[in-house]
Amino acid sequence: MTFAELLDRIGGMGRFQVVHVALLVTPVLLTASHNLLQNFSAAVPEHHCRVRLVGNGTEWHSNRTQATEEDLLWAAIPKDASGKPEKCRRFVRPRWHLPNASADGGNGTEWETEPCHDGWVYDQSVFTNTIIMEWDLVCNLRTRRQAAQSIYMGGVLVGALVFGSLADRFGRKAVLSWSYLQMAVSGVCTAFSPTLTAYCVFRFLVGMALSGIVLNCMSLVLEWVPTHVRTVAGTVVGYSATFGQILLPGLAYALPDWRWLQLAASMPFFAFFLYSWWFAESARWLVLSGKLDEAVRVLKKVAQFNGKKDEGEKLTTEVLKSSMQKELALAQTSYSVASLVQTRTVRRISCCISSVWFATSFAYYGLAMDLQNFGFSIYLIQVAFGSIDIPAKLGAAIGMSYVGRRTTQASSVILAGVAILANIFVPQDLQGLRTSLAVLGKGCLASSFNCLYLYTGELYPTVIRQTGMGLGSTLARVGGIVAPMVKMTGEYFPYLPPLIYGTAPILSGIAAAFLPETLNVPLPDTIEEVESGRPPAQPQGREQVLLQKMDQGHT
């Protein structure tokens, strides 16, 4: 009897599994919101220099009782090339002695100007308060917005490394509960940050917690459901993140102050922390950690919850050992990261698939964190960006099943790159076309992510599968860190960011074409099988890739 058969005997997809999965995927809705929260909490409103106060505190136009706000801006603020008030400069002396704008050609470019020494005035019609408005992250400080997002993504990377290792040592349940608590506390502290430095520190901790939640949520979901519903359960987790992206703009619209928005996205994690103690620890992890008695106790509780108490009473430590002989044998093998590059075929796989992981995440966050440049409501754009994931992930699943993994993977990233590059040649006034191309590109990148998780697990043999997944996941997070930094180059070369964002996926798509096809190919167990191209002696179901990934923990 295999471990999968053992799960079926104690209820299969019973009441425990349904409740367990529902409680695990609910927090994923808000983790997706945290990932893209800075689109709204760090939105950049229209702004211009604050008019200088003189003398006893009266403004320049105090003696002109009939002056309108437009008159004030004309007198105090020069116009930019588009005819709007300049964002970062103001006149040293007002132009009240001129009768109207036509007196000096309209924009007063020949008049002496100076930086905004007295701060800025922001348009509060869309957002009442953002970190941009609160800490004046405009003009010379505008790049700090992207730096804050890179720091957050750095936290996501560190969290994957730290909490992945801790989960292998202390178990999925304990680390998941701690991650919920860290997300709640760090998120609330972010909402009350007095300075930008404090904000970045707490956002880094939020990013760490997000990795701990996502990694261990997926582990506990997949390790407790039967094999035949594992794909469905994994899809439910993925679509929870998608609906979280759609939920975010509604939350942001209702809470236009960034502090309240941050607080609303963080407070529910206190509730998630409280009910997380009901979760059952992974029986697979308990067995592989040598805690057989604890594993039997947990399985008996699950059997009782599912109405299979009699089957649960039959469980013993000997039954567990016989059910997981292969997993226990694999747990005894020792391989390092160096194993990913020591042999020719595995080295080629590592280089090619890692480039796809990096490029997909790099371009994804390059698009997803730049919503204000499309000229439409940022709320509607976020809904479109989230909604496109629904058909995109479905299309990826169909393509992988009928066309093949390699073709689906390569075509999704190449098409994404082409869509991003095409936007370079679309005039700024064709906002509808530009937005459509961006949404198409984002959907293709979502398809790429959907394909990557399965394809990567199928390419690597069992003995280094988790190590390979860890390498790809790490490079994806590096891509998320680099993406905001590349955005900064747009301040000097406007076409450079989209050029880089578009070129990277195309190059990775070409690299993906050199990967072997894995559709209907048995999963390899050893490096020798990958190098020789021989299938393993005992073919396994395609679903087993996710099971084996969970059995050996997360990097």
Image (cartoon, grey):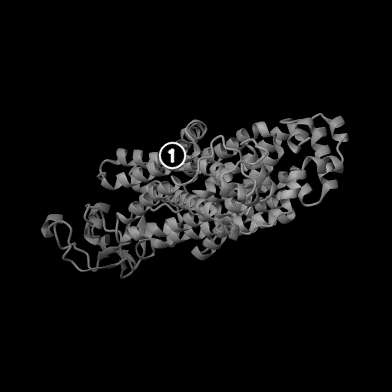
Identify the residue at image location x=50%, y=57%.
478
| Up/down of 99 relative to 438, above or below | below
**Residue 392 relative to residue 552: left or right:** left
Residue lying furthest bottom: 55
* Residue drawn at (60%, 57%) of the image: 339
Q: Is residue 217 visible?
A: no
Q: Position of residue 97 (x, y in %)?
A: 15, 63
Q: Is residue 324 visible?
A: yes
Q: Quadrant of residue 318?
A: top right
Which residue in the protein does label 1 denote? 443
Quadrant where the N terminus sits is top right
Image position, residue 472 (x, y; %): 54, 52
- Which secondary structure, mark 1? helix
Q: How many marks?
A: 1
Which quadrant would the C terminus be assigned to in this image? bottom right
Amino acid at circle 1:
Gly
Q: Nearer the viewer, residue 273 or 161?
A: 161
Q: Position of residue 535 (x, y in %)?
A: 61, 41
* Foreground residue among 18 and 121: 18
Q: Nearer the viewer, residue 333 or 311?
A: 333
Q: Residue 277's spot in the image, x, y percent?
A: 75, 46
Residue 409 or 56: which is nearer the viewer? 409
The relative height of residue 49 versus residue 216 in the rendered view (above or below) is below
Q: Is residue 122 left or right of residue 24?
A: left
Crowd tier of the residue under label 1, counting other residues whose Cα lies within 10 Å: few below 14, some 14–19, many 20 or above: many
